[in-house]
Image: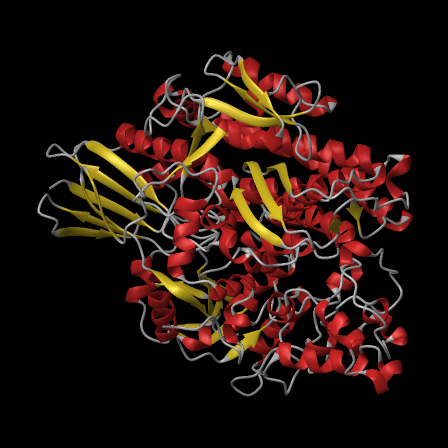
Amino acid sequence: MPDKLKFGFYWAASCGGCEIAVLDTNEKILDVIARADILLWPVAIDTKYSDVKTMPDRHMDVCFFNGSIRNSEQEELAHLLRKKSKVMIAFGSCAHHGCIPGLANLSGREQILKHVYTAEPSVVNPDGTRPLVQGKVPEGDVTLPEFYDKVSPLKHVVDVDYYLPGCPPAVSGILDAVTAIFQGTLPAKGSILAPAKALCDECDRNQHLAKKMPDVKRVWEVQADPAVCFLEQGIVCMGPATRGGCGQRCINGNWPCTGCMGPTPDVSDQGGKMISALASVLRVDDEKNIAGPETEKLLAKVKDPVGTFYMYGLADATIGSRRQR
Amino acid sequence: MSTRITIDPITRLEGHGKIEIFLDDKGEVENAYLQVPELRGFEQFCVGRKAEDMPQLTSRICGVCPVAHHYAGVKALDEAFGVKPTETALKLRELIYCGYIVYDHVLHFYFLGGPDFVVGPDAPKAKRNILGVIEKVGVDTAREVIKHRAYGQRITEILGGKPTHPVSGVPGGQTKVLTEEGRKEIETMSKSCVEFAKFTLQMFEDVVLKNPAYMALITNPKLGHAVYNMGMVDEKNRVAFYDGKVRVTDQKGKEFVKFEGRDYLDHIAEHVLDWSYVKATYLKAIGYRGLVDGPDSGLYRVGPLGRLNVADGMATPGADAAYRKLFDTFGTRPVNSTLAYHWARLVELLYASERALELATDPGITGTDIRNMKFDMKAEGVGVVEAARGTLFHHYRLTEDRMIEKVNLIVATTNNKGPICMSVREAAKELIHKGKVDDGLLNTVEMFFRAYDPCFGCASHVLGRPTVVIDVRNQYGDLVQQMAG
């Protein structure tokens, strides 16, 4: 019997959904515990920072790192855990691409701080108080981490070996990854541990796959038919530009895909791919007049293109963020 | 300069926090601070997004409470779209909400807060967790724990598509009907949850209430707070999670105010602290007087104990009996003991299970009239629900084409921020003397934030770092001891 493996689970800037996804493996987590010691898991275990610091380098076999890098403390921990781990897995959409919190890159540090601590209608703050990185209370000094100007995916900060996509990753994806770790069958470094297919390829509504998108409708404007492709019903669905493997969770809820699994294989920019897909289905019957004002009108009905096409991937997209000074 | 003890970060919670304890020359606690070191700023970056995306965008504030954010958002949209959801949709929403409370409360009791009681606050740190609980209660019981947490998630999955970050809420209703097959599954699971909740209440009685050491902590008047309480109630003033009015009671249990969620700005305000990224709320009518108890302080508590304190009872029979037992045992009303939060949470676990069973057997639950699309558009909407940890407010202002123009969010743990800090400070004062600390003692201090099941992920809209360092420094600030505790 070989020695048990050593795992670590760490959260940076994330919502906790990735931790819940681990728990959602349910009784299978008992099998994992039987074959691996969990050395670090803040939501469940009282492991100490000093324990991690004093571990030999590369002591942990695998670190599952969820969350993006939003402040100085998370950056420090990313470096520390990289040093202490043989394999670093970016776990979930935040670590992978920055996810929804990455939309904050449309704003900047100052704008966010001003909004939260001064502008909100419930805030009473005549002195303009703000949290201080180097603060003072009557009894002494207190410190807080530095809030960065932008959100970064994990790979912008440290070397990442694998990516487990999804917001949060599907249980089947987590179990497949863990099985590959136990069996020593992980693929090449840099791989994304999910099927190499677009969501459309595995969608139950595939038989009705849109040949055309006659109109652009918002979800609140129509009651979507649960058997028909969303695009065919005029609803923007990120399926053509998004990797599969999620179990069609949103589609099962009769809601279009919003793209949490990241871009399809061989595509670097999910939004770009979606714009291209839309271009090929939007009112194709009327191709001769495609450049006319009617098409312009239709395109104007696609609201908030950044928030729609880059809901999960803005922090890692080729379009970047707002202009940096 | 004072001696300082730093617990960084605190563990077995959602999100990240740090405790700084300052000792005087004699080693007695002068003061303690619970700092939340992070922020994400959803209120800023949701501006410019499509209104209908808000329930999903904001569910990424918290993957532990996604259902609460989802439906606070959906309710804000109902109001802004000027639409009343259909009866079936309201039942479905309440049912999914019960599933969420079940999984969240089971998670807290068995994984986060409970290990301190089940294996003991000063058990070796390697045992003070779910693994230690499994060892203590046996694998068969552990499987029951895992199964019933999963049932809560499964209910949200059946009704909401995804178990975490559900998608089914839209202005005026739901996107998905409940099939008879799904209904049957939920009925079976709910029945089982009712029994499991009863089992857990009994275990709490056996393990906690019959243990004099725990009872000493629970009944110590210094480890409780005479603050206002807040929670949502139905028309009979019983605990309500999904819909109702917000009721506030005073230190004597008397109603101070009862208001509609949309009027929240008339009643509560937020105070900015320069030593924490999370703000502290207070009652506007009283004002902010610092982190102090009493009727002159506008601080209030939310969450399971806050809810039970403001309510006159529970709307299901088993839970109502459990509710009465809690208050009879303490013999006071409101109950101020911080550790009583755990007991209140289990009373709610039974309520959510019983209510889920009622809804799953309601003949109307499989109706197909799940959306009302007659809109009477308004510019603004406020949505209020009771998250597992307390009252949650979402407030949106929309442009004419239904895009987000302004967002304000007050989450459960922001409401509790002041009281949590006071609880940690008072626990440190009560437990630490002559500068003596050890792992078990400091963990006992941590029990006093854990009772609230705080979600600093929600409160700061970000989660934190995983490990704990305790530095003990002398009066010159030199490190004299670094501890694993």
From the viewer's perspective, is A318 left or right of A59? right
Outermost residue to the left = B476
Residue at image coords 79%, 35%: B357
Q: Nearer the viewer, residue A147 or A172?
A: A147
Residue at image coords 35%, 31%: B422
Residue at image coords 33%, 29%: B291
Q: Nearer the viewer, residue B80 or B21?
A: B80
Image coordinates for residue A260, horizontal then vertical, percent = 63, 68
From the viewer's perspective, is B234 left or right of B159? left
Is residue B164 at all visible to an observer of this figure? no
Is residue A22 at all visible to an observer of this figure? yes
Image coordinates for residue A6, horizontal then vertical, percent = 45, 69
Give the answer, above or below, for where A74 lies relative to B140.
Answer: below
From the viewer's perspective, is B357 left or right of B417? right
All told, the count of numbered labels is: 0
Q: How is the image coloured?
A: secondary structure
Q: Nearer the viewer, residue A166 or A229?
A: A229
Q: Quadrant of residue B82?
A: top right
Image coordinates for residue A2, horizontal then vertical, percent = 50, 75
Give the answer, above or below, for where B262 lies relative to A233.
Answer: above
Image coordinates for residue B229, horizontal then vertical, percent = 50, 23
Name the quadrant of the N terminus of chain B.
Answer: top left
